[in-house]
Image (cartoon, coloured by chain):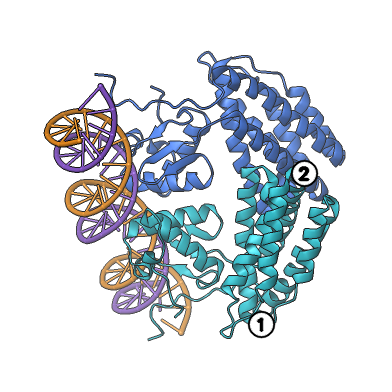
Chain colours: A cyan, B blue, C purple, D orange
DNA sequence: ATCAACCTAAATTTCGAAGATCTATTGACG
DNA sequence: CGTCAATAGATCTTCGAAATTTAGGTTGAT
């Protein structure tokens, strides 16, 4: 059983916000596996809270596309499939490209400085795929921060919100891929190229490189996804083991 | 007091889903005005349900950007401003254009037929700005259906979901504009041009026309928005009248 | 007169239990 | 032996009340 952070670990003003963040993190990192049923009672125990905060958090995550709800049948972690991954990645390439283009247009010195800083932090955080098969949480955070810094000057909260959501949803697939085979690719060079193009205000090149960056990730993930199963396994719901 | 549909009017399997749809409709149509406080007790009465379904619905609508939540201070209908409108519209132009391009690429005969049908229904539904200042609900539905038909063959559920959300959020501004001055513009011709370009597989032209279509709408809305107030009014929360 | 602390009132947030719905099992019948 | 219906168990959904938190007004001291 994976260790479950409890609500006390976060400093959120309300329980439902805490639960929402914890759940999102658990789902994105695949500590809660795709298609896994999310029973209310189990989640209540896991996070040590009542039913209302859990349900409210699940409702929000449904809107984010991380959980799915069948009326009167309960919540599940969103299923994964090649088809969905392709859809997600293609959309993300466009959104990420658009945000990057706008960011390059509007970004000033402050943006450049933050970007350089984020890259430096990322480059010095060695991507050590840790022993237990889960990716280094620190590297993951820095990686995310770097890509966020790229588009930070985009100027559109709406677009950034969409981008962030797509990032979460694709990260979940990456986490899934890492769980199955632990050979992290070295994309430090790619990140530097993207940054260089952005700082040179070469939007076309930066967008193209980002697209390829995402596509390469997708190709790897797609491969490992095929190895487990073409479609999402039915994941037979067992009560507490066959009797 | 605007007439409030109750939960019985919808055939949803659960109360929270019904409340969510009713709330969304009320907010998009500005029957619940921007920045208006959404007290739990008031909504309980309005829809005749308990507190849990209402809260869960509000959580989902927060994810959709239609309501805002300040922790421990309650929900409000999302505020409006020129700045937000500009952001929303610019993003929507890109998203709508992208979806349309993909739709033109993948669309088959079925798509063409549905699009023609949607256009015909829209063209024959006269845009009568009804007496009370609210726009004709039928026309609004057909208009929405037409734009949906344009992008229906896009092939990306993810992108379509984003598009639908942006459509809702911009429609709210349009509704606000219509409330203040009742001079509906005649955009039947624009719709036909867009459709023609799409059916001719002229993606560039279709996308450009759609962009202009949205921009024209934005210009009108922006104007009427400026007339009311530059920023969203603080909307002093009165208890039950000054004593 | 001004400011701070306290106290009251309203609203949100959360909990636990009752009501409704689905799933699985059991037993009867063709 | 297979199919179907009824029942029992589990789970989701909803309600109403208790617990926290915020906002506003009052009192008292400087």
What residue appears at the point 36 percent right and 41 percent down from the top-left corner?
Answer: B73
Chain assignment, label 2: A
Residue drawn at x 65%, y 73% as measured from the top left: A125
Q: Nearer the viewer, residue B137 or B218?
A: B218
Relative to A191, is B84 on the left or the right? left
The N terminus of chain B, quarter of image = top left
Q: CA distance from mark 2 to mark 1?
A: 39 Å
In the picture, the disc for residue A58 is: none
Q: Nearer the viewer, residue A124 or A152?
A: A124
Q: Quadrant of residue B218?
A: top right
Circle 2 is placed at which residue position?
A: A105
Read off the residue under disc 1.
A181
Q: Circle 2 — which element?
A: helix
Q: Which quadrant of the rendered structure holds the C terminus of chain B?
A: top left
Q: Is residue A177 above or below residue B65?
A: below
Rendered location of residue A1, percent (x, y): 44, 80
Vertical arrangement, residue A39 with respect to residue A114, above or below: below
Q: How many marks?
A: 2
Disc 2 and disc 1 on one polypeptide chain: yes
Q: Dot 1 lies on which element?
A: loop
Q: Residues within 10 Å of mark 1 (few under 14, many from 20)?
A: few
In the image, is residue B131 above or below residue D14? above
Drawn side of residue B123 relative to residue B66, left or right: right
Q: Chain of mark 1?
A: A
What x and y, as percent, mark residue A12?
40, 56
Q: Nearer the viewer, residue A106 or B63?
A: A106
Observer able to see residue B206: yes
Q: Relative to the observer, which residue lies in front, B114 or B218?
A: B218
**Alpha-carbon neighbours of circle 2 within 10 Å: few (<14), some, or many (≥20)?**
some
Residue A146 locus on image (x, y percent): 67, 61
Look at 68% across and 39% down and name the residue there: B92
Q: Given this view, does label 2 or label 1 mark the residue nearer the observer?
A: 2
């Amino acid at each position: 059983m994976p260790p479950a952070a409890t609500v006390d670990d976060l400093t959120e003003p309300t329980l439902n916000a805490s639960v929402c963040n914890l759940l999102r993190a658990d789902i994105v990192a695949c500590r809660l596996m795709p298609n896994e049923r999310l029973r209310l009672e189990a989640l209540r125990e896991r996070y040590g809270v009542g039913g209302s905060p859990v349900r409210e958090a699940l409702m929000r995550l449904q809107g984010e596309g991380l959980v799915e709800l069948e009326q009167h049948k309960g919540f599940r972690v969103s299923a994964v499939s090649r088809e969905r991954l392709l859809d997600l990645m293609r959309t993300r390439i466009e959104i990420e490209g658009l945000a990057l283009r706008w960011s390059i247009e509007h970004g000033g010195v402050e943006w450049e400085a933050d970007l350089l800083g984020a890259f430096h932090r990322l480059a010095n955080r060695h991507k050590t795929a840790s022993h237990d098969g889960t990716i280094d949480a620190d590297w993951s955070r820095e990686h995310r921060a770097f890509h966020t810094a790229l588009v930070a000057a985009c100027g559109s909260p709406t677009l950034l919100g969409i981008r962030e959501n797509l990032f979460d949803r694709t990260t979940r697939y990456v986490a899934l891929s890492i769980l199955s085979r632990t050979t992290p690719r070295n994309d430090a060079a790619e990140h530097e190229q993207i940054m260089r193009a952005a700082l040179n205000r070469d939007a076309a090149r930066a967008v193209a490189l980002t697209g390829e960056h995402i596509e390469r990730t997708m190709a790897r993930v797609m491969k490992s996804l095929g190895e487990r199963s073409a479609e999402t396994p039915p994941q037979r719901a067992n009560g507490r083991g066959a009797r």
